[in-house]
Amino acid sequence: MVARPVKILLLFIIILVCTQYSTAQRTSTLRTKTGTIKITFVHTINEAPLVLDSMEYVNPFDEPYRISKLKYYISNIAVKHLKKSFAEPESYHLIDEADAASLSFNFDAPANNYSSISFTIGVDSIKNISGAQSGALDPANGMFWTWNSGYIFFKLEGSSTSSTLINNKIEYHIGGFAAPNNALKRVTLQMPDNTLLLVQAGKTCEIIIAADINKLWQADNNLKIAETPATMTPGAVAIKIANNYSRMFTIKELLTPYSP
């Protein structure tokens, strides 16, 4: 006869094996029920593609300008289905018009139909006070002021004959995460025409988000180059500019699921 302690040990082993198998099965099932969301940003001015350096544009105040640099952070991305939402883990992306590879990125999400996408323009306070970061948040990317001031959320540089600065420069470095100068902006975009973003298991779908740079000059506030050719510190002007560029995003197109 098998001793009672041995029987108990065997029963425990069987239960443990069955539990591990069940957990593995559930994990495998969850993995097969996720799809990939690809997000692509395209920058336009007056519905024409943004071209750095060589192309001259005109803002709503008839001020000509050229853009040489455009960079900003997109973070804390979430998609929503009814009252439930899914947030991308460790969600920090540096969009850089000069780096084509940075204009698109992917993350996995549960298979579902999503009605909206939300994201923050900038870097949240936790990361701002966490010291040197890596990847998109690496200070080497040129989007970090000092250990005290934190990250630059949005950077646009260029030139304009309307600017009173040396060499007609325009420079907008927007940041600040502490009240009363908190320039972090949360943007929520509904899927267009009452459609839904279809995320299917094992497939990729794509959201193309257009950013109209001319909204920088006129949306919630009027920003004339002749009056404000630059701002480089947190403050009231930075918040006004942040309010403007938070309005520049729209969903241009949804691409249905395809096999990557």
Image (spheres, rainbow, N blue to C red):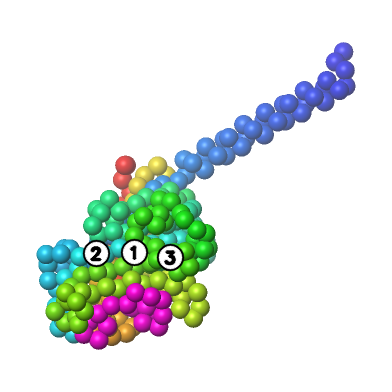
Residue 226 highlighted magenta (yes or no): yes
Question: Mark 1 and mark 2: span between their CA atoms?
Answer: 10 Å
Callout 3: few (<14), some (14-19), or many (20+) C-alpha neighbours within 10 Å? Answer: few
Amino acid type shown at disc 2:
Lys
Label 3 sits on a secondary structure element that is loop
Q: Secondary structure at mark 2?
A: strand
Q: Is residue 230 left or right of residue 177?
A: left
What residue did someone put label 3 on?
A: 146
In the image, what residue occupies the spot 80% across and 24% down? Answer: 9
Return the residue at label 2: 69
Residue 26 lies in the magenta-colored region:
no
Whether residue 192 is visible here, answered yes or no, is no
In this view, the residue farthest toward the top is 1
Q: Nearer the viewer, mark 3 or mark 1?
A: 3
Q: Amino acid at mark 1?
A: Tyr
Q: Secondary structure at mark 1?
A: strand
